[in-house]
Amino acid sequence: MKTALVIGATGLTGSNLVGLLLSDSRFSKIKIFTRKSLNNQNQKIEEHIIDFNNIEQLSSLFSGDILFSALGTTLRKAGSKDAQYKIDYTYQYNIAKLSADNGIETYILVSAANSSPDSKIFYSKMKGELERDIKLLAFKKIRIMRPGLIEGVREKSIMKGNIAIAFARIITKIPGFKKYKPISAKRLAQTMINSVFDDNIRIKEYSWENLYEIGDPTY
């Protein structure tokens, strides 16, 4: 059985991921790194409340088999591009590098559709830079998820997000826009887990076409 590490466990995708990992017999321990407690007393969970600005002091905690990275925020929540970059790139990269250096073999990243280090769009460029730099780390297996919009039950209903998902359902019927097809957070999380066991290719990217291929169709 394997030990999973999760960052971003309090978010929409991350919370679904933790729920699925808890019920998956292939995982004996789930190490969660977060700024606030999940208040989950399940015996499989090992929770660490950390300061993401000082992870070097916690190096020994980043040990196990698979690092799942579902950390991320929006520009609105972060307050500035610099603040968003720190969360979406710096925190994730620093933890990934520390984990790779500690011998963790597999890394699963939630990125975004249209991610590219050459993009003129801030968000897409940021995600692309993270993908590019993660690929240079010493993981034996890297899986990159590139979903469009992610849907599910959030702590607070966001009208803007609901409108965006409804709009995406319409435009994804147009050729060339299928990459934005919404995916449920639970199905995305299941695909993340399944990708750990799919094959031995070192780097594999999951766009809208294959995000659905290995996820349980009930999700």
Image: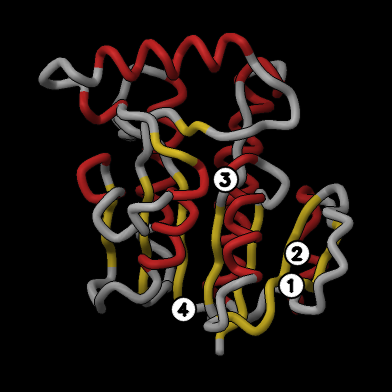
Residue at position x 55%, y 61% in the image: 68
Q: Mark 2 sits on what residue?
A: 56
Image-based side of 115 in relation to 82, left or right: left
Query: Label 4 to label 1, Cα distance in Å?
Result: 16 Å
Query: Label 3 to label 1, Cα distance in Å?
Result: 25 Å
Q: Which mark is residue 105?
A: 4
Q: Mark 1 sits on what residue?
A: 59
Callout 1: SS? helix
Q: Which percent across, then down, holds residue 40? A: 84, 61
Query: Label 1 to label 2, Cα distance in Å?
Result: 5 Å
Q: Mark 3 sits on what residue?
A: 13
The answer to whether the residue labelled 4 contacts the one labelled 1, judged by CB atoms less than 8 Å apart, is no
Q: Which percent across, then down, holds residue 47? A: 82, 66
- Between circles 3 and 4, the one closer to the viewer is 3
Q: Amino acid at mark 2?
A: Glu
Callout 3: SS? helix
